[in-house]
Image: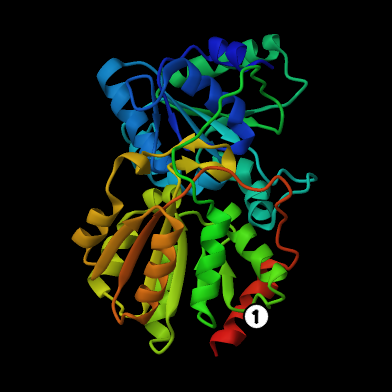
Amino acid sequence: MKVEKFLDIIGADFYSGVPDSQLKSLCNYLINTYGINNKHHIIAANEGNATALAAGYHLATGKTPVVYLQNSGEGNIINPLASLMNKEVYAIPCIFIIGWRGEPGIHDEPQHVYQGKITCRLLENMDIDYFIISQSTTEDDLQRVMDRFKKQLSQGKDVAFIVKKDSLTYNENIKYKNDYTMTREKIIQRIVTVSDDDPIICTTGKASRELFEIREVNNQGHERDFLTVGSMGHASSIALGVALNKPHKKVWCIDGDGAVLMHMGAMAVIGNINPKNLIHIVINNGAHETVGGMPTAASCIDLTEIAKACGYTCARSIHTLKELDNTLITIRENEALQFLEIKSSLGARADLGRPNISAVVNKSNFMKFLS
């Protein structure tokens, strides 16, 4: 189904959410039609943030908002759904559009498998009626569902569309870019070289895939690295847990800008505890690149000043390879909590592979290495 017709039948004029590869057609259409960060469309820091924005929109207008997300973000919407939106609390209606990663019977990455199994169950537990959009869904099907949904929305209930792969289409392509020249893969190559035998906790998405392939090219094992293949936004907290319990090891966290924004409160906790053996690196390309390249707010804020305000001892930002080589050596030698923002370009190799070891094996090998 064309995304234009899908949204026309839904009939909303406010959208907020976190981009998803399964919903790329939707995200591209919204950005092309409305732009971002305005009264019609906001790319949120996390899915709970999007749900709260939707609540504010309803309070101000009386109309029904739309929140879009990957199903991995269902956990982030449960709190506002249960304690804010629910008909037994404020009865705020909202339409959720959820990309279904890990759909049972469809091969997907390990972080999506269990989430895919419980996607519908979580909505049922939250008393949310839903309809599954597939490639065979017709406009008449959708209209009949919306007629049913409208009655529930009028009663202050929430509803959801679960979208299967390739079920929504959009003919126009959008090219996302920035002005930086360093690639994320080259940045990670240099981190690997300088970090030597130190443990690395790496955020989800292409960063972990590139780290894995760099080790393969270098004929190195993968035991030094914990690949946070899911749980977006939590790599820095994992790294803090490791750093506190391995005080004689230098611990590196490779993070992304979208991930940092998703749970930025972790930086305040890290800064308050101030472990002297933690290096927090954010590779900032200003985009949710792994799921399509849609912009984040990180291109418009000063992450280093935020880190300093949170209590990081040292914080700096760089955007050239020459600066990178010199800085990495310096921060490894320093005994202090450090934050490094590295501005990078968008894009990855077309032939970028995926880790060929299971998450459980990765965990086991990493724990043996730490011990």
As drawn, is 282 to the left or to the right of 117?
A: left
Return the residue found at the far right. Answer: 105
Instruction: Give coordinates of residue 217: x percent, y percent.
Output: 71, 68
Q: Quadrant of the N terminus?
A: top right
Instruction: Give coordinates of residue 291: x percent, y percent.
Output: 58, 41
What's the residue at 46%, 49% (across, down)? 344
Query: Which residue position holds label 1?
Result: 365
Q: Quadrant of residue 360?
A: bottom right
* Rendering colour mode: rainbow
Residue type of the residue flagged with mark 1:
Asn
Badge 1 element: helix
As drawn, is 134 to the left or to the right of 179?
A: right
Instruction: Give coordinates of residue 7: x percent, y percent.
Output: 55, 15
Instruction: Give coordinates of residue 55: x percent, y percent.
Output: 33, 29
- Within 10 Å of the Cα at label 1, are there few (<14), some (14-19), or many (20+) other Cα atoms? some
Q: Quadrant of the C terminus?
A: bottom right
What's the residue at 33%, 54% (across, down)? 264
